[in-house]
Image: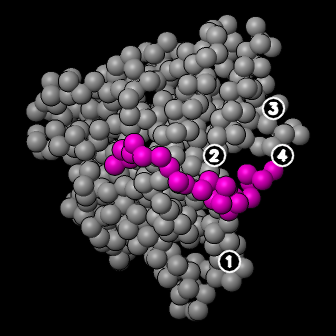
């Protein structure tokens, strides 16, 4: 999964770029170079058109109406659920729960699975985690006294899996790790982590926010129990995502929220919940977001992934090599297995100052701590980094533009 082929890429990036209106604009009089894809990706025309068509022709609430618009909206919404099942290779459509994104998916698991926990139970996360996969478990620690344990990270920004066997104990109740580090680009060996955890009867939650945008995901081959994803990271709309969970967990866990559509019957004495996935989907959802996400994932699944993976590896190699030539620049996170994300610092230059100068040159990067304070502090970047995160619609001219702009920013700030 997301291995790097050694063959040269024949990927036609310019043909693909034409599908993204946002990439055709200028910023501060310069052609936009959009390198903030780990924060959110741009949207192809097929996604924009799908959302537009819903509002123009099919806008209605789902599941409740007998009229034509409601029936069409419901059909489109449930087709989106099937598309997510297909894109993640889940065993059944009932294993896909719509949420607002990865953060809500993790909070759903923490809230529902957390009701099984008691003081002294252990949750195992990694030092590479986004705050969204730290804070919900910290809240459980504050509320009921669970123990939070951490898989360490090496100086290269890779997980030290040699520590994993000793960290899993008879009190371990869940392992929660990310698929790909948003701050460093490190691809974690989640299949190996799942195998080790399952050998001890421990379920695994994978934060997949950064995983799906860079390749096809197979949750059955991975072996995880839960997989969380966000639409806006995967070329779809904001405010929508999904939690994959194996059906036995969805049957067993209690609801996350209460309200319409997650019930079968209600009286003042008792409530009978609907079966999964409806049990976890209270209230009117982001219908248009789900429809846009369907369009994004169907488009995403039809791409030439072997060529794209090779092409992304070329972007990463070119950006890494060029940036390393800049005096005083240090790349944070140099694991062997990465997606095209380059985080760096320059001695004597604050990341925010570099980012501001790059923006003046039309280059969009992210600066700061990237919701990953612990790992950046450990790797010697407590004030944050400049992060250039590439998608497969970026081209080599943009790599060159980034390197030249960082050279110039360094000269100005020095």
Dot placed on the residue nearer the N-terminal end, 2 or 3: 3
Dot placed on the residue nearer the N-terminal end, 4 or 3: 4
Q: Which mark is residue 410?
A: none
Task: Establish if 63 lies above or below 107.
Answer: below
Residue at left 45%, top 76%? Answer: 78
Give the tally of numbered discs.
4
The part of the chain drawn in magenta is 1-26
Residue 258, given in percent of the width and then of the height, sits at 42, 62
| Disc 1/disc 4 C-alpha distance (Å) | 28 Å
Residue 92, given in percent of the width and then of the height, sits at 29, 70
| Foreground disc of the pair 1, 4 | 4
Q: Which mark is residue 394?
A: 2
Q: What colour scheme was applied to this rendering of the protein?
A: one colour
Tag 4 secondary structure? strand
Left or right side of 14 for 230: left
Left or right side of 393 for 304: left
Tag 2 secondary structure? loop
| Foreground disc of the pair 2, 3 | 2
Q: Quadrant of the C terminus?
A: top right
What is the chief secondary structure element of the magenta stretch? loop
Q: Which mark is residue 26?
A: 4
Residue 327, given in percent of the width and then of the height, sits at 64, 10
| Disc 2/disc 3 C-alpha distance (Å) | 16 Å
Residue at left 72%, top 19%? Answer: 407
Residue occupied by mark 1: 53
């Amino acid at each position: 999964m997301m291995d790097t082929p050694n063959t040269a890429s024949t990927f036609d990036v310019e043909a693909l770029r034409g599908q993204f209106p946002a990439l055709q604009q200028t910023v501060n009089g310069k052609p936009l170079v959009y390198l903030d894809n780990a924060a959110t990706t741009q949207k192809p025309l097929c996604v924009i058109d799908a959302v537009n068509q819903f509002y123009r022709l099919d806008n209605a609430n789902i599941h409740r109406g007998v009229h034509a618009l409601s029936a069409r909206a419901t059909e489109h919404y449930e087709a989106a659920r099937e598309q997510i099942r297909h894109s993640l290779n889940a065993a059944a459509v009932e294993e896909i729960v719509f949420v607002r994104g990865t953060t809500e998916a993790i909070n759903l698991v923490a809230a529902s699975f957390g009701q099984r926990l008691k003081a002294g139970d252990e949750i195992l996360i990694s030092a590479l985690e986004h705050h969204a996969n730290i804070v919900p478990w910290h809240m459980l620690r504050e509320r009921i006294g669970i123990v939070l344990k951490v898989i360490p990270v090496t100086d290269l920004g890779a997980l030290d899996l040699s520590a994993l066997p000793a960290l899993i104990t008879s009190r371990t109740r869940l392992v929660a790790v990310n698929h790909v580090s948003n701050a460093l680009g490190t691809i974690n060996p989640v299949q190996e982590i799942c195998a080790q955890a399952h050998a001890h009867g421990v379920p695994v939650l994978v934060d997949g926010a950064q995983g799906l945008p860079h390749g096809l995901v197979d949750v059955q081959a991975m072996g995880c129990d839960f997989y969380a994803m966000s639409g806006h990271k995967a070329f779809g709309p904001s405010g929508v995502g999904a939690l994959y969970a194996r059906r036995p967990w969805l049957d067993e866990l209690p609801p996350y929220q209460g309200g319409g559509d997650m019930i079968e019957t209600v009286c003042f004495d008792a409530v009978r919940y609907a079966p999964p996935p409806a049990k976890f989907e209270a209230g009117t959802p982001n219908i248009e977001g789900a429809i846009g996400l369907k369009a994004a994932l169907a488009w995403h699944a039809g791409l030439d992934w072997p060529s794209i993976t090779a092409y992304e590896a070329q972007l990463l190699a070119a950006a890494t090599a060029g940036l390393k030539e800049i005096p005083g620049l240090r790349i944070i996170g140099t694991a062997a297995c990465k997606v095209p994300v380059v985080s760096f610092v320059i001695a004597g230059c604050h990341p925010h100052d570099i980012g501001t100068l790059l923006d003046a040159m039309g280059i969009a990067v992210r600066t700061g701590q990237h919701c990953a304070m612990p790992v950046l502090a450990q790797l010697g970047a407590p004030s944050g980094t400049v992060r250039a995160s590439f998608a497969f619609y970026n081209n080599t001219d943009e790599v060159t533009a980034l390197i030249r702009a960082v050279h110039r920013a360094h000269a100005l700030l020095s």
